[in-house]
Each structure stands twice: as structure tokens, then as C-alpha cells.
Amino acid sequence: MSLSDEDAKLVTLARGAMGRAEATEGAAVRDLDGRTYAGAPVGLAALSLTALQAAVAAAVSSGAEGLESAVLVGGSAVDDGVAAVTELSPDATVIVTDRAGNAL
């Protein structure tokens, strides 16, 4: 599967979040206005989020009313964040890649 230039940018953002957090996965989303948000897993006693959930939470808390696309790097299509993406935007594209950014 070939990624569009805009989705390739999301892969770069997701890989950056993954690297900064020294995590095994990272995620990024693009809202309907073209703004992007990235996230890495959160593992606190009081809060647990997958990378994709963190990216969706960042978008929603910034006022995003919908998502166009989401990328999860190093994760799985059964990630709980996929439900968050589809709840916000049922038609949003969700792309899962390996840690190198190659679409699965």
C-alpha cells in the first residue's frame, strides 16, 4: 500500500513521538482542518492510553471536531485507539505500519 504525502507526514510525526518517548509505538492524527497531533503510550497508575488514544485525546482537547486520517506505527489494528478514531469520525482512514513506517 502506498501512502499519500500527507499520510507519510503522519508516519514521520508518529515515529518522532515513538522515539521521544522511547516507546514501541507512536501515533499521529490529522483533523478536518489539516492540523496534526501525535502521541505515544501513557502508562501511569492513574492513566493508561495507547499511542493512538493519546493522539486522539490531544486532537479532541485542542478542539478538533473530526479526523481525516490516523496512523499507528508499531501497533496493531485491534488497538483501542481505533475505536476512538471511529467514534469521532466513522469515515476516517486508519493506517497501521510497522516500526519502520511500512504500511501493513
Image: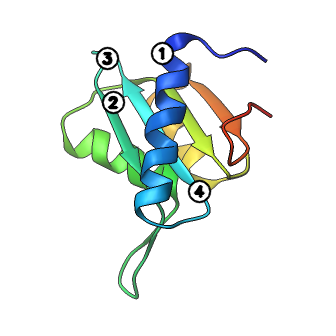
Classify residue 10 as left or right of residue 94.
Answer: left
Determine the CA span between mark 1 and mark 4: 20 Å
**Residue 92 in view, yes or no:** no
Are discs 1 and 4 less than 8 Å apart at CB? Answer: no
**Residue type at tag 3:** Gly
Which quadrant of the figure contains the N terminus?
top right
Determine the CA span between mark 3 and mark 2: 6 Å
Identify the residue at image location x=39%, y=82%. Answer: 44
Residue 60, position as x, y percentages in the image: 28, 41
Q: Residue furthest bottom?
A: 45
| Tag shown at residue 6 | 1
Are discs 3 and 1 less than 8 Å apart at CB? Answer: no
Label 2 environment density (alpha carbons within 10 Å; few <14, some 14–19, many ≥20): many
Are discs 4 and 2 less than 8 Å apart at CB? Answer: no
Total marks placed: 4
Identify the residue at image location x=56%, y=35%. Answer: 71
In the image, 57 versus 9, the foreground residue is: 9
**Residue type at tag 4:** Glu
Classify residue 45 as left or right of residue 5.
Answer: left
Determine the CA span between mark 2 and mark 1: 10 Å
Q: Is residue 100 above or below residue 9?
A: below
| Tag shown at residue 36 | 2
Q: Earlier in the sequence, mark 4 or mark 2?
A: 4
Residue receiving disc 4: 25
| Tag shown at residue 34 | 3
Q: Earlier in the sequence, mark 3 or mark 1?
A: 1
Which secondary structure, mark 4? loop
Determine the CA span between mark 4 and mark 3: 23 Å
Which secondary structure, mark 1? helix
Residue 42, position as x, y percentages in the image: 43, 70
| Tag shown at residue 98 | none
Which quadrant of the figure contains the C terminus?
top right
